[in-house]
Image: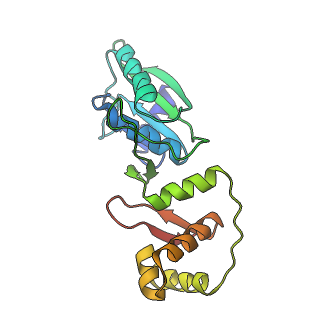
């Protein structure tokens, strides 16, 4: 990435593939962003860019690189593939642009602090990194092992599509309440429909996941 490419990306704002950070102040938050990109489709983490799209840069770029390296080795469970670019914006300031690759091993997890044994999975949704639910984690696991799913389009699947056509989306809870089936049956059916390329899941942190027709 060069300066012109950086300016073009910043102009587009934060989105599914781009996150701005003034600097690495809170390593655990940076770890969440990295993991979210790796669990989704990859993306750019731009250190030295403010939320208002101001390219402020960093004076001590070596310190930011050191902190980033510590994060990926100490606060993330699985190894991360990335490319780092140091882009000078003036004689004294530089932007650290990190291209995070989509992980081959999903889900990846971020630790809240060094030494933790259990991490939290995050995924990228629009311009946010949100905590993945157990359903999202299961889908990521099955996608990673390339589990082939053959959809038997039966009564549950037909009625699921009817609910989506009426309401725009469906959740596990609404499927359970409408069809009077178990939570496990509803969950397994929706997961299979995602893996079969019929539905997509949109996580919402603190709320139920929503499933939409592709």
Q: Nearer the viewer, residue 141 or 168?
A: 141
* Residue 33, picture quadrant: top left
Q: Nearer the viewer, residue 137 or 45?
A: 137
Outermost residue on the front side: it is: 117
* Residue 120 seen in this snapshot: yes
Can you say which quadrant of the picture contains the C terminus?
bottom right
* Residue 170 seen in this snapshot: no
Q: How many numbered marks does the figure carry?
A: 0
Horizontal and vertical percent for residue 164?
Answer: 50, 80
Q: Is residue 150 left or right of residue 84?
A: right
Residue at 54% x, 65% y: name it: 200
Residue at 45% x, 42% y: name it: 109
* Colouring convention used in this rendered image of the protein: rainbow
Q: Is residue 31 above or below residue 146?
A: above
Horizontal and vertical percent for residue 163?
Answer: 49, 84
Q: Is residue 54 above or below residue 197?
A: above
Horizontal and vertical percent for residue 62?
Answer: 39, 14
Q: Is residue 19 left or right of residue 148?
A: left
Residue at 60% x, 81% y: name it: 157
Q: Is residue 120 left or right of residue 194?
A: left
* Residue 56, picture quadrant: top left
Horizontal and vertical percent for residue 74?
Answer: 41, 27
């Amino acid at each position: 990435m060069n300066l012109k490419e950086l300016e073009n990306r910043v102009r587009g704002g934060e989105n599914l593939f781009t996150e701005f950070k003034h600097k690495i102040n809170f390593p655990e938050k940076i770890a969440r962003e990295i993991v979210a990109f790796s669990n989704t489709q990859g993306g750019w983490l731009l250190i030295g860019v403010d939320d208002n799209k101001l390219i402020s840069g960093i004076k001590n770029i070596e310190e930011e690189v050191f902190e980033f390296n510590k994060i990926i080795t100490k606060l993330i469970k699985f190894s991360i593939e990335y490319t780092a670019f140091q882009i000078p914006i003036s004689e004294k300031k530089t932007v650290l642009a990190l291209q995070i690759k989509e992980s081959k091993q999903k889900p990846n997890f971020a630790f809240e602090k060094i030494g933790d044994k259990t991490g939290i999975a995050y995924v990228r949704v629009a311009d946010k990194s949100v905590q993945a639910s157990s359903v999202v984690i299961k889908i990521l696991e099955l996608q990673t092992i390339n589990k082939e799913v053959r959809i038997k389009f039966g009564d549950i699947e037909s009625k699921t599509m009817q609910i989506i056509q009426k309401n725009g989306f469906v959740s596990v809870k609404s499927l359970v309440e409408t069809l009077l089936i178990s939570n496990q049956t509803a969950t397994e059916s929706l997961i299979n429909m995602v893996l079969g390329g019929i539905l997509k899941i949109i996580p919402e942190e603190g709320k139920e996941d929503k499933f939409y027709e592709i």
